[in-house]
Image (cartoon, coloured by chain):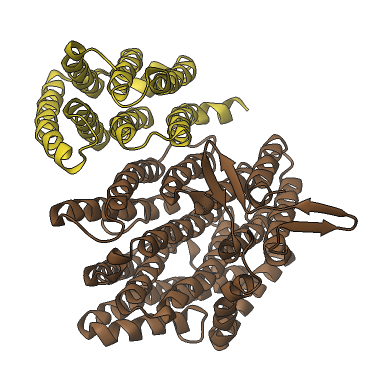
Chain colours: A brown, B yellow
Amino acid sequence: MNSAFIWIIFPSLVAVILLFLQNRERLVAILATITAAVLALLAVWLPLQEQIILWRWVIPFSDTFLVFGRRIVLSAADRPSLIVIYLVAALWFGASPLARPNKLFVPLGLGITALLTAAIAIEPFLFAAVLIEIAVLASIPFLSPPGNKAGRGVLRYLTFQTIGMPFILISGFMFTGFEVGPGNPEFVAIATALLVIGFALMLAVFPFHTWIPMLTEESHPYSTAFILLILPVVISIFGLGFLDRFVWLKDSPSTGLLLQVVGVVMILTAGIWAAVEKNLSRIMGFAVILDVGFSLIAVGLAVGSENEFFRVLFIAGLLPRGLSLGVMALALSSLIGRVDNLHIADIRGIGKDYPFISISIILALFCLAGMPLFAGFPLKLGVVEGLTGLMPQISVWVIIGSLGLIVAGIRILTAIVAGERESENEAPEPRILKIFLAIGWLLLVLLGILPNFYIQMILNLPAAFTQIGPLS
Amino acid sequence: MIPEFLILPIVILAFLTASILLISWDWRISIFILALQYVAVVFLVSSSWPIETAAVKLVAGWMACAVMVLALRNLHSNRINGGVKPISEIVFRLILAVMAGLFAFTGGARLVLWLPEISVEQAYGSMILIALGLLHLGLTNHPFRVVLGLLTVLSGFEILYAALESSILIAGLLALVTLGLAIICAYLLTAQTLEEVS
């Protein structure tokens, strides 16, 4: 038995089987949810030993899988990431029958989850860039489903991710030449520039962010939100791997500064564009860019100040992002077919007919903007405070960016409650949808009121696995 | 290893194929040229790898071409070709290709200083393909053309990376990416029709 078999090969096989069953959408969603949930639970409960005892059998267990002379290692340190990734996947697949994305979404989504897990585990870690690219290729069929012309957003997404991979592989090779310390300054500058461009392309950092709003506008909100959540998480973990391996890069004052400035630019531009945007899906895209900007600032602060608190803020920030995106994507998906278009002009007066959907959109946006009393607030406040301590003059721009997203939320709120709807309410909100959305609201508010609860949980998570001892 | 006298013609072949891809409007010509481009890639990669390993690039590239041919032959040519280009556009693209080639020529010379593992010919070949591939991507938003551009950029990168990394795993994964791009191209072009049929 092998950890790679459990968390990579097994879900990949299930994904292939589900592809053949794709016409039975509900069954596929149930099977994928169960698979992902079981894998998340196994990441919590499976003992970190060299043997697993099942009743009378003793099964040898290893955390390393050899493939063509290279290793895929899923050690104790990777367990928190496995829990997060498979839990997100389980929640997403579980609600998919309500959102009704393309029927390829669930099988390919499970396959992508397995591929991205392999990306976290592969050694040398640089090869992760190629696995991420393969995951991107696998996502195209559900982002541009049959019957639709390939949109510019999908093509730009494919282009940027594909071009990003070579930049990272080449820069990674150059970096291994000066693992201990930087050598020739010109050489270091070139390698760093290539690395920055590579990550900027893959993480949709300004000015390579344009594909996000285009993609959210063209594709189904639910499947797009899944990609916009899971891909940046894995790419960020991959990026942190770079910083952890090349200590001189982490210690360089310009690294932290660069991440902070880029983060601020992302927040400001996303906030301004969101404030004037008319399409709800595109607003969701800008909200994701804004949240990734906050993550970059948190990483920049963690690198610049050697303070683990900001690293925790970065990891903890993924939970509110996932929740808000999930709630918003589900609400937007539910609006498809109930309104003509996902434009502000087309949602006038829907608050009366679809109160749960309407409230969900507003709450999710306010949470992503970092509004007080919501899950995103304590973490974003921590990031802004940290930035103010270092560069008070630019932290103002972060607040302006967040205000931009709040303005977008207020514009949507005004349209929802103020206008009069012309058409009749033909499809009321299903009860199960209301339950899912209400659970989402509850969590968004609870995590905002009791942030210490989950921050403490995140702090304890890595320790829970390392205390037991190494696998081999 | 390839004979010394063949190296320069192969670099020129890489430039010519990438330039023709930029101006050709017929998908049959484009795919034939792409297949020819992979021959140049294999010869340049074989400077770093044994020819039997380098042949993986050729197999993957030709399979990608075959996948695209199978998908495209059933489609109406207007959906793929987008009509004949005016002569002014062809001239414009050729001028751009020459400029990109000159850029690659100067960039290749610098590249050898930063990455001493690669030979000058490999540097020129890879930079030409990367520069012209990026140029191709900048001039189109048609799925077929975008994938041609991406495959060209990727071929240039593979020449470069073969000199730096000889792992079989990475060779296999990159071959998978090449094939994956071709499959995605076929999917994006035919998806519209698939739904119409169903």
At 35% from the left edge and 16% from the top edge, which residue is drawn? B35
Q: Nearer the viewer, residue B129 or B32?
A: B129
Q: Nearer the viewer, residue A6 or B192?
A: A6
Which image quarter: residue B31? top left
At 42% from the left edge and 23% from the top edge, which residue is drawn? B53
| Residue B85 showing in the rendered view | no
In the rendering, at what x and y percent does residue A321 appear?
A: 50, 69
Side of A109 where A225 appears, left or right: left
| Residue B76 showing in the rendered view | yes
In the rendering, at what x and y percent does residue A246 appear?
A: 33, 61
In the rendering, at what x and y percent does residue B176 appear?
A: 48, 32
At 59% from the left edge and 55% from the top edge, which residue is drawn? A74
Q: Nearer the viewer, residue B91 or B98?
A: B98
Q: Work out whether A453 lies above or below B187.
A: below
In the rendering, at what x and y percent does residue A178 appear?
A: 27, 55
Q: Nearer the viewer, residue B115 or A166?
A: B115
Side of A231 where B165 appears, left or right: left
Which image quarter: residue A56? bottom right
* Residue found at the very far right of the displayed protein: A56
Which image quarter: residue B166? top left
Q: Quadrant of the C terminus of chain A?
A: bottom right
Q: Work out whether B117 lies above or below A454.
A: above
Side of A455 where B40 appears, left or right: left
Q: Work out whether A113 lies above or below A435.
A: above
Q: How many marks?
A: 0
Q: Work out whether B10 lies above or below A410.
A: above
